[in-house]
Image (cartoon, helix red, strand yellow):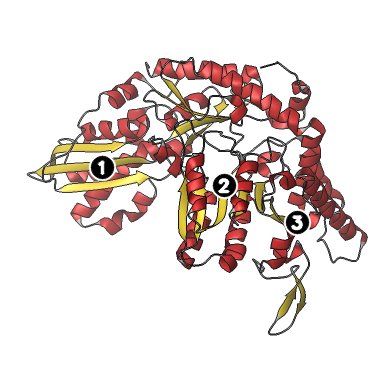
Amino acid sequence: MSSIYTEIILDYYRHPRNKGQLDNPQIQARDSNPLCGDVVEMQMILEGDNTVKDVRYSGQGCAISQASASMLTELVKGKNLDEVRKISKEEVLGLIGGELSAVRLKCALLSLKVLKTGVYSYLGTADGGKEELAGL
Amino acid sequence: MQKTVPFDIEKVREDFPILKRRIHGKPIVYLDNAATAQKPRQVIEAVDRFYEEYNANIHRGIYSISEEATAAHENARARVARFINAGSPSEVVFLRGTTEAINLVADSWGRANIGPGDGILLTEMEHHSNIVPWQLLAKEKAACLKYVGLKDDGTLNQDDFHRHLEDGAVKLLALTQASNVVGTINPVREMVREAHKHGVKVLVDAAQSVPHMPVDVQDLDCDFLAFSGHKMCAPTGIGVLYAKRKLLEEMPPYHGGGEMIREVHKFESSWKDLPYKFEAGTVNIEGGIGLGAAVDYLTAIGMRNIRLHERELTAYALGKLSKIKGLTIYGPMDPVLRGGVVSFNLADIHSHDMATLLDEDNVAVRSGQHCAQPLHERFDIPSSTRASFYLYNTESEIDLLEASLRRAAGIFKV
């Protein structure tokens, strides 16, 4: 049987992009998956018209959670927050590829949940995103 | 170790319908028995028969099927009592499982007997179900939790144990007979004797021992012993608290309600005899009957034989797995000292990734902290992957586990 652990996932797990911390980020959020103990933190610095100038993630956990966080940082860089808000679950799962079991979906989507929590909180629309965040 | 064939494993496997199931055309290699065991058709049929032939509430129905149900349920209790060599069936309380049994002791015996400054002695290898009830009690009573530490090989530090006993504050020792993570079988019999010399009562968490080896409560001389049916081929939702009769008689009720009372007046009530004083409401009748059938099934094969078989499987697994480059096994490496539980990590592969990789080959294991966070902190690891065996597992299944681990190592380029 082919594995969901593709070369791409392993590459991001072993050689993460945009891992680390930013000085004075405008957006910062952190969450964990109590089932696995996965932890992801996201930080962003904005410029001009709410465009993501720089982004970093940090955390620990399984390859799925950490690789997806790293992939997500590359996806959001240069996008404005309106576009970031519209990133869908399907888009993130598409980056990972393969079929994930229900339990592992939580690992894959943890970074998106953290990212959106940070964005909604920055935009002051935390309530508006509650239902969406609960679905992640 | 001398190779023995204690029972016909192929015949045993025929008894478990789920082992015939195929996923993606391949059999399930079920190695998560420490979480729950599979059920033989003898148990499934006993439960079916109850519902199809004599389903009725027990104890008070004055008609034939209710009497049949009562007899079947109480008969099961008597067989469970014999299975663990309790002095009498009245020392066997049917509850939901190990967790409820420990909570009952904490709530009933604990509240009546533990006071400010008293010590409750646990070990660093306890399952959360043998930690959290004591934390709640300690908080309520301003009592102190103390822990017997673990040595690097996953066995208890006996010096530590003696030091705690000698400080004089300890009133209760609550420990597991077999670890659900490192597999260690603790010298409970000797520890009970030491504890009793200091007037300390002992509760044994037998969730990982009663299903896998002969356990004799009178020989252990423990005061309380708890275990779950679902880990020993019975349905979920049924478990046992064994306690010495004198203690049960002195203990106040746990839950109030029907079935547990002798008389109820507007402002006071009196309690039924043991064990019914602790069984409020309609109990899990099918569970009791299923547990009785499971005990019959295991007894027919023989608990000594099951223990021997698992010990051989564990020795085989330890030998195979320890040859995999980058794989670390936790706990004692002598299979005589451990139950059929092998937890490990492989290089930097997270346990959840490992469980997914093994699942791609239909190998079912557990990953995470196995409800034993303090133990993982003791070994300074975030989590582990656990393979755990039972009577129906075979060496060829361990070969499949090994092959799947080597495939995972290949994918992760370990």
- As helix, strand or loop, the secondary structure at mark 2 comes to strand
Q: CA distance from mark 2 to mark 3?
A: 20 Å
**Chain of the residue under label 3:** B
- Label 3: element kind: helix
The reply, left or right, for residue A64 in relation to residue B339 is left
Q: Residue at left 87%, top 60%?
A: B66
Kindly tell me whether residue A100 is visible in this rendering: no
* Residue B200 image position (x, y, % from top left): 59, 55
* Quadrant that contains the C terminus of chain B: top left
Distance CA(mark 3)–CA(mark 1)? 53 Å
Q: Which residue is mark 1?
A: A41
Residues at discs 2 and 3 both on one chain? yes
Q: Chain of mark 1?
A: A
Say which amino acid is labelled 2.
Answer: Leu
Q: Which residue is mark 2?
A: B175
- Label 3 or label 1, whichever lies nearer to me, is 3
Q: Residue at x 61, y 63 (%)?
A: B109
Badge 2 local density, few (<14 within 10 Å), some, or many (20+)? Answer: many
Residue reaching furthest to the bottom: B266
Residue furthest to the left in view is A48
- From the top left corner, tell me how far across and down residue B1 is, in percent: 66, 17
Vertically, is B202 above or below A11? below
Position of residue B289 relative to residue A93, above or below, is: below
Confirm whether circles 3 and 1 share one chain. no
Residue to which mark 3 is pinned: B91
Indicate whether B392 appears above or below B278: above
